[in-house]
Image: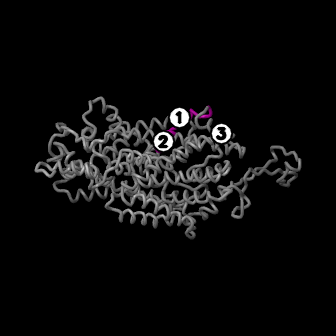
Amino acid sequence: MQTDHSGQDVQKLHVEEGGENPGRGTWASKKEYILSTIGYAVGLGNIWRFPYLAYKNGGGAFLIPYFVMLVLAGIPLFFLESALGQFCSQGPVHVWGAVPILQGVGVAMVLVTLMVSIYYNVIIAYSLYYMLASFQSPLPWSTCVEWADSHCSTSPKEYCNVSGLLVANWTQENISCPSSSKIRVPVQSPSEQYWDHVTLQRSASIEETGPVVWHLALCLLLSSILVAAALIKGIKSSGKVVYFTATFPYVVLVVLLIRGVTLEGARDGMELYVGSRSNLTKLTEAQVWKDAATQTFYSLSVGWGGVVTLASYSKFHNNVLKDAFVVTLTNAGTSVLAGCAIFSILGHMAHVYKMPVEDVVKEGFGLAFIAYADALSKLPVSSLWSFLFFFMLLTVGLDSQFGGIAFTSKHATLTMTASGFLYLLGLPCVTQAGIYWVTLIDQFVASWVLLILALLEILGVVYIYGGNRFIMDAEMMLGQKNTSYWFWWRVCWFFISPGVILVILIWSLLTFTPPTYGTVHYPVWALALGWCMVAFILLWIPAIAAWKLIKAQGNAAERVKSLCSPSEKWHPYLDVHRGECYSEVDCGRGKNHSKRTTPEPDVNVISSSWL
């Protein structure tokens, strides 16, 4: 089919025989892309972070600001990132050919993903360890055994002050004890002591590094091997893996929900989550809206670069808008489903311990590996439920890593090298002080740094590249649309989304407090190191901009203007998709973009359905 005109017939042959983009790689099917993107967006934060924030911010009342932020900022930003990646078929660095002066934002996104992948790998290692420990019956954290100290107990301890003497078994000796004489002694559950003394072998502070915890180091090695094995052939291998890893968590969540709601006391947990005990007065607090927006960005992985990368492997005429709705709404639904499953179990746990549900829930790692582990140990056939739960955490963690470390089939060696590099960087996080390092990275890197990158991203695309120009690019993929079709997206991209992010960013900085792990405070040098990590990421933005300005030609104004205009390499990846505007002269420098016509799409490169 070799011809003399534009080589388009040659291109069509490649489409038929090797996918639309054989040189870079294309998803084998729409299902693989949808499942991979859902798997990347749905992560560990949906399982433990969302339920905790719901509890902290009024239970079911938290769902109102969460869905408001999802509509006003989450979906518009997710659509924008997906469209950018699909249009040029490039990753988060090269996609900034649209606005060369902001290419440092892409580099910063890669660095954020790299640093988060370090501790995310460690969390996967925790899940692996608990999953393997679940083969024991009874579960090792169900009772206080040789590794426990005197503070370990499966029930609250109360002493009675009788004439100056503390009597422990006063109920058994038929001694009446007035409330004023009862003294409750703080205790730790077996699951909490197992987490500190066995799993982590935690030291007193970050300054006491201690040796490597070898069972965690081996689990970390296994998690790195799993990630590398799934990505060794690029999207062709990871796309097959996600058929299982993206769907299995939903099976476990549904099973846990069915089992949870049948447990005694489950109603108390559900009442707090979506019932009459929801505190609607919380909606008047700015902190609630800040937490809702932060959770939206965190769970959708906006600003990380992974969304751009996964979309870059889609076919050019894929309906990216429909995909954005499918993924974002599935992500939100998963959070709500996880909350129902978890709160029902926590209600049962509160019933067993005879305490309010509010006192059972803990934040972050404590919720997953202490409260959940404790609750699971009280279920019938506890080993099976525990194995399924931590296997679920493993699969959602692996799915998110697949999006963070994505290379084409030509880069199998690079994939193995990156996985090995992440393993070595993760070793300090599996020492006896490892949990302090994990918390430090999480608090400084995976928080408001993402807000800065998301803000620069939307400002760069909408106000420098041009929101109308971006919409015309999107129409090359989606087909011509009328003005009313884009009205809502224009309002969000130009005003609402950047405004929301800016307000949240300023609020986050004004209310910033140094991170702690429980009651353990970080020394000054550790906090300084956290700020150095932030600076290392963000400094690439002005550094690359300055370097490009130095290399550019002309006076200062001409250099800035040229770097705020699309580069000559900014266009659809394949010639057949470039149309009139991008075929000869770059739109930003030559022809009038508004007069561009969209080419008639080739039937060979249009996905026939969204699933």
Q: CA distance from mark 3 to mark 2?
A: 34 Å
Depth check: give the residue in front, 457 or 13. 13
The amino acid at mark 2 is Lys
- Give the main secondary structure of the magenta stretch: helix
Badge 1 marks a residue whose secondary structure is helix
Q: CA distance from mark 3 to mark 1?
A: 31 Å
Label of residue 469 in the image: none
Q: Position of residue 538 (x, y in %)?
A: 37, 55
Q: Residue at x 73, y 55 (%)?
A: 153
Depth check: give the residue in front, 105 or 153. 153
Q: Position of residue 107 (x, y in %)?
A: 34, 56
Q: How is the image coloured?
A: one colour
User: Which contiguous range is marked in magenta?
Assistant: 276-295
Label of residue 283 in the image: 1
Q: Which residue is mark 2?
A: 290
Badge 3 marks a residue whose secondary structure is loop
